[in-house]
Structures are given as structure tokens and as C-alpha cells.
Amino acid sequence: MVLKASDELRHPEFLNDDYHWRESLYFNFNDAANKIGGWLYLWVVPNQPKPSGMLVSFYHGAWPDLKVNDKAMASPGHRIVAGDRWVYCFKQDVDHLIDANFDNVELSGMKFERIEPLKHQKLTFDDGEGNGFDLDARFMMAPYDYADGVHPTPSWMAANRYHRSWWVKGTLRIAGTQYAVSSTGDSDHSWGQRHNIDFCKNLFKMWSFQTADGALSISVLKQGIDENDTQIALGYVTRDGKVAAASTVETTASYDENGVQQGVDLIVTDELGRIIRARMPKMHSYIGSGTPQTFWGYEGVGDYIVEGVGTVPGLISYFWPPRVTPQALHAGKWK
């Protein structure tokens, strides 16, 4: 389905009284020059006590602690430092529902402003303590509609969603240091029910990378859909101006003693029969999240080595249900 400029806005026509209904915007990027990973997240959950929220997280270096974002948020300046490693996190859940539409929305110092429909946005943030960002977001492609996928999006995940690759350029301000950012990333807009109990029963793996010229970008998931670990491929491949749904995703990896993925090999085949082979030997920066009792894992950034292309910066995100332990991963019981 061809998505329109109006799909960048909120979707009240899908709203119902389900407690788990949500609509969200998400951006991630890999600042390869500074070895900084970042993600920005804004959501509305109209049927919950705190119906709006936002999160900003930036990380540099390896952080296997699953609670590091919470610890950073509670620390002076919302930052934790260990040697040359650091994490910044600012998160707010508020007791009012955002009135603004998503073409010009602001919450707790973070603002997303649409400059040109489907093409250009401005993202800004200031936490009032000297930390923030000014980012120019330009999209490489039209939104990829998950309804066009080979496999349907699980009903407990969303009514619908789209992803698209983007170029990011601007500055980060963290603890008195200004970082110039010029990189690429992935973005997501989802709406509908998100039943976290069902979501957290299943494994979730995501890979994304984009060349600087936009000629190649992928954003694919291997999504578990039941407790037998049946997995489906979701997402897309864009190559030389042609977008196609991912039909299969094959991957292997090893894991350290904390369950952090490394030596990741990826083979993606799309509906046009195109095959993308890539490998990320190691994430240069990553962050842990969740709890072993509910849902846990690691998201990080590094360099993919893409067959026929070369080195391409990107992201890997692996999250696991409680039945998968770091010990089992390290012992090679899971790919």
C-alpha cells in the first residue's frame, strides 16, 4: 500500500479502548565517527494512567548492565561514566495526553517538527541541564508499509507500522561536549495494540544498515511468534531505488558470557530474489535493557561488512524471553 503524508500523523481512526493501544515514533542512528549509538522515542498510550512519554538514550562503549539506562536517568546530569565509556538517558512519562499531531509535537523538551511531508523533519531536544541535540532528518525513501510484507505483522505487535531509512546531520550536546553527527539510521512509526505480555514471550531480532548514498538500505526483523520459537521475516530491502519485502532472514552469531551478540552473520533474501550478505564482527557500542525475568537483551551499533559493497555502519538489536538465558546463549544453544 502506498502510504500518504497523512500517515506521518496520528491515527485516531484506529483508536479503541484496549489498555495496550499505543502510537509511537522511533529513530535510531549510528554515529560511526564518534562511536555513539542513539535512539529517540515518543509515544502515546491514551488508555493508561500516564498517557504520554518520551525517551532519549545515547551510549558510547560497551554496557552489558541491563539497568544502565535507569541508572543514568537517576544520576546527576542523567549520565553514567566509566573510563572513556558513557551513557546518557532522559525519560519521562507524563499524566496528560499530548494534544498535538505528529507533524509538530513536543514533550519534555523533545520536539519533532515536519518540514516537508515524507521527506524532511527537524528533531530537537534540551533537558534544561545543558544536554540535548539539534538534528536534521532527511528520509532516503518513502515509508515501507509492513502491511506489504510477506508475513503479516503479529496482531499483538501493532495494527500497522512503517519503517524508513534516514540521513541524520547535526549536533549532540552531552556533559559540555558537542559532537558533530553526520550518519544514517532507521525509523519507525507504529500504531495499534502492543500486548507486551505476548510480545515478551517471543524473541526479537533486528538488523539495519544504510549506505551514505542511500543506494542500499535494509531494516529487517526475525520475529518470534510463538513459544516454539517459530520465526517470521519482516521488513524490507532497498537497493538502487527498488524496495522489496524481506522474504527470508538467515543469521548466526556467538555470544559472550553476558549474552551479548557478536560475530553476527546475516543473509537476507527479498521478494525480488536479491540476496544481501553481511557480517558484523563486533558492536563498538551497545547497551543492555530489560530484565531476565521478563524480556532482556542488547542493542548496539557497529560496522557491517556487506558483500560487494564494503563497510557500512548499522545497528543490531537482540531481545529474548525469559526461557533464553545468557548461559544458554554463551554455550551455543541458540543462534
Image (cartoon, helix red, strand yellow):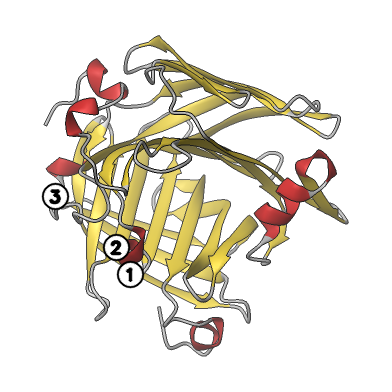
Is residue 234 found left or right of 68 in the rendered image?
left
Residue 38 is left or right of residue 5, and the answer is right
**Nearest to the observer: residue 226 or residue 214:** 226
Q: Label 1 amino acid?
A: Asn
Q: Is residue 125 left or right of residue 60?
A: left
Q: Position of residue 303 (x, y in %)?
A: 56, 52
Q: In the image, which is nearer the foreground, mark 3 or mark 2?
A: 2
Q: Tell us which disc is closer to us: 3 or 1.
A: 1
Circle on res. 202: 1
Which residue sits at x=48%, y=29%?
A: 96
- The residue drawn where x is 48% and y is 27% is 167
- Where is residue 3 shown, x and y percent of the image? 19, 25
> Residue at the location (48% across, 32% down)?
212
User: Which amino acid type is marked by label 3?
Assistant: Glu
Q: Mark 2: which amino acid?
A: Gln
Q: Residue at x 43, y 28 (%)?
A: 97
Report the number of discs: 3
Q: Which mark, residue 271?
A: 3
Question: Which one is earlier in the sequence, the residue at label 3 or at label 1?
Answer: 1
Q: Residues within 10 Å of mark 3 (few under 14, many from 20)?
A: some
Q: Would you name the residue on which mark 2 appears?
A: 223
Give the spatial CA distance, label 1 vs label 2.
Answer: 7 Å
**Left or right, 85 with reference to 294:** right
**Is residue 171 at least partly visible in the picture?**
no
Query: Which of the two labelled residues, at mark 3 and mark 2, occupies the earlier sequence position?
Result: 2
